[in-house]
Amino acid sequence: MATKGPSKSSEQSGTGAANSNKSGLRKPVFVKVDSLKPGTNGHTLIVKVLTSNTVLSKKPRNTMSFRGSQNQNTRIAECLIGDETGTILFTARNNQVDLMKPDNTLILRNAKIDMFKGSMRLAVDKWGRIEVTEPENFVVKEDNNLSLVEYELVDSLKPGTNGHTLIVKVLTSNTVLSKKPRNTMSFRGPQNQNTRIAECLIGDETGTILFTARNNQVDLMKPDNTLILRNAKIDMFKGSMRLAVDKWGRIEVTEPENFVVKEDNNLSLVEYELVNVVEES
C-alpha cells in the first residue's frame, strides 16, 4: 500500500512558519526622536513634517558621465520633523525633498545622525528609505528641538562656566576615595551607599580635561567609553579646571565616536592665578 506524502496544507504551513521566522528577524525597532544621539545610525522612526525650506536648488552643468548626461537638479531642503517626544532638523536631498511636505507622516528607515556646526541633523542616505504613510494622531512636541542643542568642544571650556553639553571619550579613571558609610539614620532611612570619587581624564579631538566622577557616575567612567555630558559645569581645584556633572545634569554612554583625542592639550594642567584688586582710596 502506497504511503501518502505530507499534505500540501502542512507544507504551506511549514513554509509560512519559516517565512514568518525570517521576517521576524528583519522586524524594525521604532525609536522616538528624543532618544536620538550623536554618532548613531540605523534608526527607524515615524514622524510628521512641520516645515520644509529649500536651501539649495542648483541646475546641473551640461556635462557627460559614463551614465549619460546629468540633467537632474541638485536640491537640498532643511526640514523640521518630529513626534510626540520632540523635533529635529532633517536634511532632505533631491527626490527626498518632494516627500517633505508639511503635515505628511513619514516612516524613516535606517536614518542616521550627522553633525552640523555642533548640532544634530537627521538624514537618510542611499542605504535607507523614506515612505509616506497614513496620518498619525500624535501631537508633535515642538518645545524640544534636538537640533538646538549645541555640542561644545573641550578646548572651548573656561573657568566659572556651566550648562555645557559635550561628547567625550574616557582615557583613564582613578578612584581617589571609596568610603563605607557609618551606621547612621536620616529622614530617608539608613545610609548604606559607599561614597566614591574618581578622577577621570576625558577628552575630544581638541583637548582633554579632568572630570570628577561621584558615586554612580564612577561606573560609567570606563576607559574607551564614549559619553554625552549634559549640563556639565567647571569647578576649580587648586587653581585648575575640573569638569563635573551635578544633580542638574546627566551622563549618558553612547555609541563609540571615531575622533582621536588630542592628548597633548590638557586644560587641567593650566593653572589660573588669583589677582588681588586693590581699590584706590
Image (cartoon, helix red, strand yellow):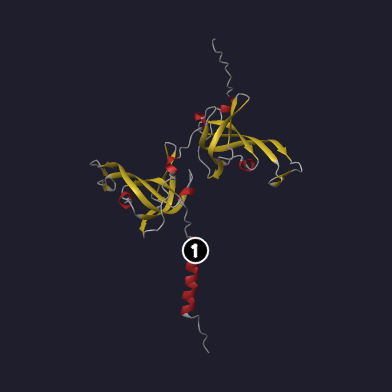
Crowding at mark 1 (Cα within 10 Å: few <14, some 14-19, many 20+): few
User: Where's residue 158, x and y in %?
Assistant: 52, 27
Residue found farthest to the top: 281
**Which residue occupies 43% across, 40% down?**
148
User: Where's residue 247, x and y in %?
Assistant: 59, 40
User: Where's residue 185, x and y in %?
Assistant: 73, 44
Tell me if 161 is positioned left or right of 215 in this view.
left
User: Where's residue 233, x and y in %?
Assistant: 55, 33
Residue 261: image quadrant is: top right
Q: Looking at the picture, does residue 95 appear above or below residue 274?
A: below
Q: Quadrant of the C terminus?
A: top right
Q: Relative to the observer, which residue lies in front, 275 or 55? A: 275
Residue found farthest to the bottom: 1
**Which residue occupies 32% across, 46% down?**
52
**Which residue occupies 49% across, 78% down?**
10
Tell me if 1 is positioned left or right of 120 in this view.
right
Q: Is disc 1 placed on a helix, strand or loop?
A: helix
Q: Relative to the observer, which residue lies in front, 175 or 235? A: 235
Residue found farthest to the left: 62
Residue found farthest to the right: 183
Mark 1 — residue? 24
Asked whether residue 106 appears in the rendered view, the answer is: yes
Label 1 amino acid? Gly
Asked whether residue 266 appears in the rendered view, the answer is: no
Q: How many marks?
A: 1
Q: Relative to the observer, which residue lies in front, 32 or 6? A: 32
